[in-house]
Image (cartoon, helix red, strand yellow):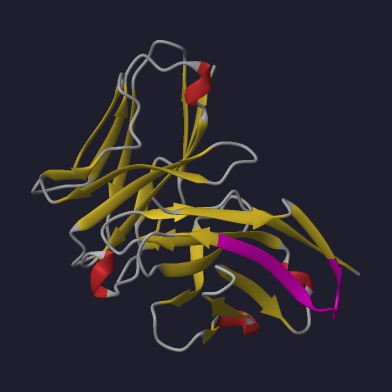
């Protein structure tokens, strides 16, 4: 059973371009969480999705950022018109059920976005 | 709302010495508490978690943590540090509903 797969591992974008980050959860997992890690900072929650639904997006910037988790395929975190401040490591985690049911969230290795 | 405070962004211990990484939490409901480890350029790996069973939780790689409700603490310890323990450690809390909230992390340095 492969772990949480994120691709690409490294992504370089020029200011104003779009960045698409992909996350394939573990097999059987229908809950996906996205986090952003800035240098010398902890992981900041961005969004929590369950198949085709956004459950909690309280950590998402109001503009330029969007996330989806379609019925088929990976979860996508999309950043439009990237700026230098978007440079960070973006981590995805998945779980089989909600955390209330004492399930574990497994993390991917992250995508490191550099905006030049 | 939940929050986590990790005391000390950098901690250095000698190889073979006790490791103590401090974590205090705030939660309006009985929390789940976690410690994760992150090696350079890697994702996060769960070390251990507290989910309201035993207050002393044993994890992987010889680490353990004790939940102290009166002190709202969940400090991570290991009796004898090994060079391979050098990494960044994150304490985290969940209100069980959805997200996990992380502290800012403590980078552990092991001195030979």
- Residue shown at the point (67%, 65%) measured from the top left: B22
Q: Position of residue A25 (x, y in %)?
A: 27, 57
Q: Nearer the viewer, residue A47 or A109?
A: A47
Q: How many marks?
A: 0
Q: Quadrant of the N terminus of chain A?
A: bottom left
Q: Is B47 contained in the magenta span?
A: no
Q: Can you tell which quarter of the image residue A81 is in? A: top left
- Which region of the structure is painted magenta? B13-24
- Residue shown at the point (50%, 85%) measured from the top left: B55
Q: What secondary structure predominates along the stretch shown in magenta?
A: strand
> Is residue A24 shown left or right of residue B111?
left
Q: Position of residue A72 (x, y in %)?
A: 10, 48
Q: Nearer the viewer, residue A107 or B73?
A: B73
> Is residue B78 shown left or right of residue A94?
right
Q: Nearer the viewer, residue B66 or A16?
A: B66
Residue A65, relative to residue A32: is it above or below?
A: above
Q: Residue furthest front?
A: B70
Q: Nearer the viewer, residue A21 or A38?
A: A38
Q: Position of residue A77 (x, y in %)?
A: 30, 35
Residue A12, relative to residue A104: is it above or below?
A: above
> Is residue A96 shown left or right of residue B68?
left
Q: Position of residue A37 (x, y in %)?
A: 51, 41
- Residue shown at the point (37%, 48%) measured from the top left: A6
């Amino acid at each position: 059973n492969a772990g949480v797969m994120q691709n690409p591992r490294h992504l370089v974008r020029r200011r104003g371009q779009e960045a698409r980050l992909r996350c394939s959860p573990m097999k059987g997992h229908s809950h996906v969480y996205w986090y952003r890690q800035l240098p010398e900072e902890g992981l900041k929650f961005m969004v929590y999705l369950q198949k085709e639904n956004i459950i909690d997006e309280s950590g998402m910037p109001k503009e330029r950022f969007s996330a989806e988790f379609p019925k088929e395929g990976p979860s996508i975190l999309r950043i439009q018109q990237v700026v230098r401040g978007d440079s960070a490591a973006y981590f995805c985690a998945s779980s089989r059920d909600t955390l209330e049911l004492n399930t574990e969230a497994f993390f991917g290795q992250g995508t490191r976005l550099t905006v030049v | 709302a939940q929050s986590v405070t990790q005391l000390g962004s950098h901690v250095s211990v000698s190889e073979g010495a006790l490791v103590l990484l401090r974590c205090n939490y705030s939660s309006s409901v009985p929390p789940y508490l976690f410690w994760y480890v992150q090696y350079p350029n890697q994702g996060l790996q769960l070390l251990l978690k507290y989910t309201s069973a035993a207050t002393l939780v044993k994890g992987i790689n010889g680490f353990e943590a004790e939940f102290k409700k009166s002190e709202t603490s969940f400090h991570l310890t290991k009796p004898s540090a090994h060079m391979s323990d050098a990494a960044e450690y994150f304490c985290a809390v969940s209100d069980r509903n959805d997200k996990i909230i992380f502290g800012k992390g403590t980078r552990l340095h092991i001195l030979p």
